[in-house]
Amino acid sequence: MAAAEREGPGQGRQSPVTGPGERLALNGMGSFEWDLDAGTLDLDAAGMAVFDLEPEEFDGTPEALGLRLPGADGERLGRSVVAALAAGGETYGGYFTVHRRDGRDQWTHTQGRVLRDADGHPYRIVGIVRDATAELAQAVQLRKLESARAQQTTIVQRTTDALSRAVTVDDVTAALTGAGALERLGADGLALGLVEGGTMKMIAMSGESLEVLGERNLTRMDGSLPLSRAVLNRQARFVTSLSALGEEFPLLRDYLGRIHYSAAAYLPLIAQARAIGGLVLFYRSRTEFSPEERNLCLGLAGIVAQSLQRALLFDQEREFATGLQAAMLPRRIPEITGGEIAVRYHAAWSGREVGGDWYDVISLPRDRVGIVVGDVQGHDTHAAAIMGQLRIALRAYAGEGHPPSTVLARASRFLAELDTERFATCMYAQVDLATGGVRAVRAGHLGPLIRHTDGRTGWPNVRGGLPLGLATLFAQEEFPETRLDLVPGETLVLCTDGLVEEPGTAITQGMEALAHAVRSGPQEAGALADHLSDRLWERWGSGDDVALLVLRRAPDPGTHRAPRIHQYVHQADPEGLSEARYALRQALRDWGVSELADDVELAAGELLVNALLHTDGGAVLTMEVLPEPVRRIRLWVKDRSSVWPRRRTPGEAATTGRGLLLVDAVATHWGVEPRGDGKAVWCEFAAEGRPRSAG
């Protein structure tokens, strides 16, 4: 249909916006008719007012509206019309701005209806325009309120989450003053104080220039400062002009000029109906506190108060528990002759509970010393109390002179009779530092680690029994002894499992880490204990109690004229023989008799192999210079067997039995002597060309 044949304006059609012969003229709302074919726009007087147009400024075309429409808004509005026409839509609408002649931008809304002919061709748009400033202003205000509420909710949630992980008072202060804490609280500065007796002690400050308040970190609770008054009155105070406080609080006057804040909220911390402290939140540019903001500050104060109350109770319980634990451990370590002992104890940092780990050093008859480390099951004050009783009982049994196996059997019986379900693991050893003899027993505990004089470390196979208490419960109070030899200069390390266990890893990894730390550590017992504490407590963290005991037998290098070396060769240590031969060769070279190295190595190898094959245990190798009456080298191999070796005459086809024949062939003299519960086989070598003769 041609344009001339379609119905146009006034041809039997009534506008949906205007009535016959009249226009809609509501306040702030006008109407329009847009002839799409003619390109004309009919705008009523109310519409002209909405667009702030005078009659002479409007020529009846859509382009004339550009006088008041910013370019971007006009383009956006045009695109919405084109899109509605192209898509066959019947209506469209949108918001845009009108730049009024007084310079004010007015939010405006339009809504139009597209009229189409029978063929669906759009020929006219009728609609309304209205001033939407008040409507959008209300919406913006609502959005601001919703945003403020969301922000306040976020502040409360983030603060609650941060403080929920705080256990101690230090944790609380760290959560309030750490990275991002002020932003989390929505403040620019913070000061936190605790009530102690009749004083207020400031325990945390955060924010630029607030360090000056530290000059009065302890003040009397007399109301002479705004925070103490808020705490005394139990009423929060919101200040939007800090400078005005100087007149009311003269003590604060000297500090007001040095802190860069304009407003503050002084908040009492109330927990269980008791004022436990006060919190100050400082702001740089705040001019008012709305009711919502005041409620937010009060809510934050309540959260902080509850967290502090829990932390104070925790610290009190923790102080009591650690005090109990410390009282159960020995106050001093006795001095020993022939060696040095160092002990270290590390309490776990997490949780209220304390563990039942302990150590002890016991003076025994005949100049021996008993060393103990143990661990009572559980992490609470009950475990600490049982530990104290068990430590004293074990010390008493050891002091009576009983052998180690009997000491642990009686200790197990004692623990079982305490009417407790707890059990304990324990490592106990009697050490004779004069001879180096060690009698060790285990009750479900980690065995000892030995560092040899050449720096190697090893875990000797110390046989063990069930944990104390369980051994009695199951009627298996057998604790077999293992005999060890601690040669001069060697170190014995005992510890509880907290030193070698890391959550999620095998204990063997921790044992290897301990062995490595011992190998790389210093020689002295105290320095080595510190070295292990620093390395391993830092490695594993501090989640478990740790008891550590280091015993070192005094080295015996001999004298300048008569030097001496010692070496322990463990029965299950395949590298021990080669290490011993190397140590002998090095010593002979240092002593200026390297020409004896081959003979000494051969004799030492034969004697060591005999001891390791035919006795139940390791062997101690000693080599020394005997300067008088004639300088010579003496080699000792000591074992714990009372069976003396005998020289054989093997046949030509025999594969064994030639050891003492070889020793007799290369040494000037050899012999056997009783030593304690075992023997020592010795041989000598002339250091100055003395002819050999069998002895």
Image: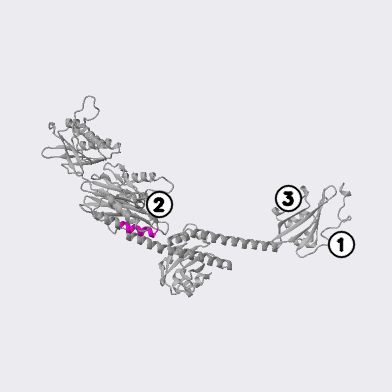
* Residue in the foreground of this view, choosing between 45 and 596: 596
Q: Which colouring convention does the figure follow?
A: one colour
Q: Magenta region: which residues?
A: 380-391
Is 383 a magenta residue? yes
Q: CA distance from mark 1 to mark 3?
A: 33 Å
Tell me the tag on residue 333: none
Amino acid on which the number 1 mark rests in the picture: Gly
Up-down relation of residue 477 to residue 192 (above or below): above
Amino acid on which the number 2 mark rests in the picture: Gly
- Farthest top residue? 652
Give coordinates of residue 282: x percent, y percent: 50, 65
Give the residue number, with chain letter if any, for mark 2.
Answer: 541
Amino acid on which the number 3 mark rests in the picture: Arg
- Farthest left residue? 629
Give coordinates of residue 65: x percent, y percent: 75, 56
Secondary structure beneath dot 3 equals helix
* Residue in the foreground of this view, choosing between 499 and 177: 499
Give the residue number, with chain letter if any, for mark 1.
Answer: 21
Secondary structure beneath dot 1 equals loop
Report whether residue 287 is seen.
no
Report whether residue 189 is seen.
yes
Earlier-in-chain disc, 1 versus 3: 1
- Side of 42 relative to 487 (left or right): right
Front of the two marks 3 and 2: 2
Q: CA distance from mark 3 to mark 2?
A: 65 Å
Give coordinates of residue 321: x percent, y percent: 38, 61
Give the residue number, with chain letter if any, for mark 3.
Answer: 79
* Residue in the foreground of this view, choosing between 139 and 694: 694
Tell me the crowding category of disc 2: few under 14, some 14 to 19, or many 20 or more residues within 10 angstroms, Cα based. Answer: few
Up-down relation of residue 219 to residue 45 (above or below): below
